[in-house]
Amino acid sequence: MGRRVVITGIGVLAPGGIGTKNFWSLLSEGRTATRGITFFDPSPFRSKVAAEADFDPELHGLTPQEIRRMDRAAQFGVVTAREALADSGLDLAGFDPHRAGVTIGSAVGATTGLDNEYRVVSNDGRLDLVDHTYAPSHLYNHFVPSSFAAEVAWATGAEGPATVVSTGCTSGIDSVGHAVELIREGTADIMITGATDAPISPITMACFDAIKATTPRNDDPEHASRPFDASRNGFVLGEGSACFVLEELESAKKRGARIYAEIAGYASRCNAFHMTGLRPDGREMAEAITVALAEARMNPEAIDYINAHGSGTKQNDRHETAAFKLSLGEHAYRTPVSSIKSMVGHSLGAIGSIEIAASVLAMENNVVPPTANLHTPDPECDLDYVPLTARDHRTDAVLTVGSGFGGFQSAMVLARPERSLA
Amino acid sequence: MSAKVVITGIGVATPNGLGVEEFWAATRIGKNAIGPVTRFDAAQYPTRLAGEIHDFAAEDHLPSRLIPQTDRMTRLALVAADCAFEDAGVRPGDIPEFDMGVVTASTSGGFEFGQNELKKLWSQGSQYVSAYQSFAWFYAVNSGQISIRNGMRGPSGVVVSDQAGGLDAIAQARRQIRKGSKLIFSGGFDASICPWGWVAQIAGGRMTTSDEPERAYLPFDADASGYVPGEGGALMILEDAEAARARGAANIYGEIAGYGATIDPKPGSGRESGLRRAIETALADADLAPGQIDVVFADAAGSPELDRAEADALTAVFGPGGVPVTAPKTMTGRLYSGAAPVDVVSAVLAMREGLIPPTTNVTLAPEYDIDLVTGQARTASVRAALVIARGQGGFNSAVVVRAVD
């Protein structure tokens, strides 16, 4: 086995859970952070609920200049990257900066910033020839969201390979998977990686309204995200970020780093079916899971917990239930599966990284977070979805998956590095 | 890890040519395609020139159901993908579905599509926003649409690193081939010549205000005043060299032999740009000494400070005037994520013909110690080429392309 890659630092910013400690409290207590939208007047929209983060950038050390030039998603990313680096205890000053890289996942980049600036330069859509004299210089950073990776690199001192990974709703897994590959192949020794999205804006609500992907359960916002429940009728849009410090296992051990988990396997596949639709058989996600397990040199039986995509659309919940059965066989029925989107909503490209953080914390605490709001399972979803309350459960290895527009299906296996290899 | 990854098919669409033949016929003779913006009335804006693709009728190439759900840059990419398959002499069904993938770069996604939906949202109301807005504008759309059209279910991806991303995508595609994929599509397309995209590009502060098409985008010239943006890009099919030979591939254009990437230190740090390190990493990865590189396709930003940094990096690695340098993108303008894939295409075609395409319109300023190929194409044996791409924010990427015997 070549270079093995471990997580040595975590930073999380999620609705209802800013900072790793608060995030885990929310999940382990099964509380929900979904609510009626407060960021703008939601009355014109079909879906009026979201999982909003109460985020004060100044409180998190961003300067007024940084706050001005960065989209909210970039701010999230910088905050969680800094938190992850501090958590790792790593001082990049002692390293060749070109051996430290950055990958940041984001599905929709600076969509909120673009929405806001468009209103200004177009005078609320009145001008076809929008007025450049009203455009701030940071509009270019919104236009090309690789600015997120640049901001994180500047905030952490990394000067190696840097990029944004943007594969829709699997971005948060694919970004970390990309970073793992760079360390394994020897291109980098340290990666600051993760994902961020802040999509709660009118244009995002409008486009998901148009395809009825988000829930219209506006009368009960706290219980609006109901993955795997028979009554679920769409996802709840969220926002947030998680970032990690990744290192090669031996060098992490040598410096006495706290090792949270090894990223033991990762794979991504495409369904080549439909930009927003899923085939019910879950074949491509199953293939990604099988390949990720093989890369981790683990049998399906080694998986103690599945962190599901669990978006709360009928199509998704059935698709991934099929994928788990197809890839894990009988073991799928014996393994707890849960969706934290029931509590923190679906933050598009960010959620994959937030779910990696949840998976690692489940291992840390030997506690599986619940699927909130799950009272009556969809009869076609017949696995153990850990309804309502967290469960004490020995967790040495976790499978986390994502599925998204464009047909991307990704799977990642996290495990204790001292495990025995199959 | 060391498997050779080769280019076996090309699809290209640039302002000076649709398809490999037309593109190269134009590029080798230095045919300029920069002109006044025609897509909208640019009179009120400080930048009024662009490299536009004319005469592209998506309806002639794509099923009608794809038209309302795609931005222009996706239509260009889908057609280029079809061309690349044809060029490679392989059909999607010839290769197992999980062994084929798509890794593209993007900078601004389907920005014109997004513009039109933002306009509807704010001028008419949210219920007028297209159902396709949920995916037509986002950065992953080209990888998704190409995979769907061609039944490609293997490892895929999307990177965004401004103009450097085109090379980062090719490097990621090479990684996937080395991990076992049989065929990966890679490259990038951008087409944001619309008022909203234009204003965002103006905000970046690096575009020229010149109105003279042949005196506007002048990298390494004393009159350099910024760049002209363009639209288009290239997609190429990458395969394992052994596998390509085994299937009797008609075209083996060249090998993706080396790659390196860095990001510059935070502005104001006073530390050196990471460009030199990216170039050195790419050369080491290809196991080539600087003297073995026959031509450099420069990023050629077109503004004095950035040109200076690139010339300094080239001089540091190759010595003063140590290698021919060219920037055919002076003919088309900068194509964002499409620019570097187009340069990779030019590099392999330069190898094939033994001809370095020219940097048009430029008179080299004496302060730069580089051997810039200006005026006309230069006959030369090209066995290895270095392609450089840099993005706003400090992204530096370099790829070495090598001839295959």
Image: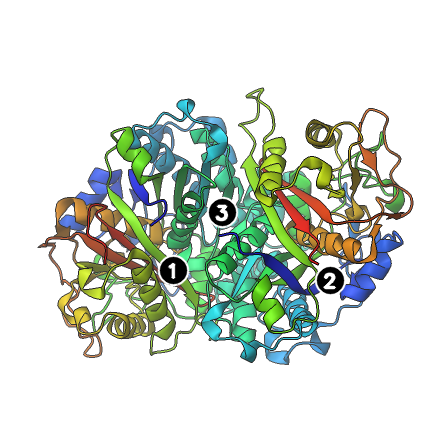
- Report helix, strand or loop for mark 2: strand
- Examine the rendered structure and indicate whether residue B268 appears above or below residue A419: above
Q: How far apart are marks 3 and 1 (CA)?
A: 18 Å
Q: Which amino acid, mark 3?
A: Val
The spot of residue B261 in percent (x, y) is 56, 40
Residue farthest along the top direction in this orientation: B270
How many residues crowd mark 3 within 10 Å: few (<14), some (14–19), many (20+)?
many
- As drawn, the label of residue B13 is 2
Q: Residue A267 carries which label?
A: 1
As rendered, which of A181 and A222 lies closer to the eye? A181
| Residue B210 at least partly seen | yes
Nearest to the observer: residue A21 or residue A114: A21
Residue displayed at 32% across by 65% down = A289
Label 1 environment density (alpha carbons within 10 Å; few <14, some 14–19, many ≥20): many
- Say whether disc 3 or disc 1 marks the residue closer to the N-terminus: 3
Query: Residue A295: x and y, percent?
Result: 33, 58
Going by the numbered disc 2, the residue's amino acid type is Ala
| Quarter placement of the C terminus of chain B | bottom right
For mark 1, name the chain: A
- Between the residue at mark 2 and the residue at mark 1, the CA separation in whole angstroms equals 32 Å
The x and y percentages for residue B306 are: 70, 31
> Up-down: is A245 above or below A195?
above
Instruction: Give the secondary structure at mark 3.
Output: strand
Position of A218 with respect to B24 (left or right) is left
Same chain for the residues at labels 2 and 3, yes or no?
no
Left or right: A283 with respect to B22?
left
Q: Mark 2 lies on which chain?
A: B
Indicate the quadrant where residue B217 lies. top right
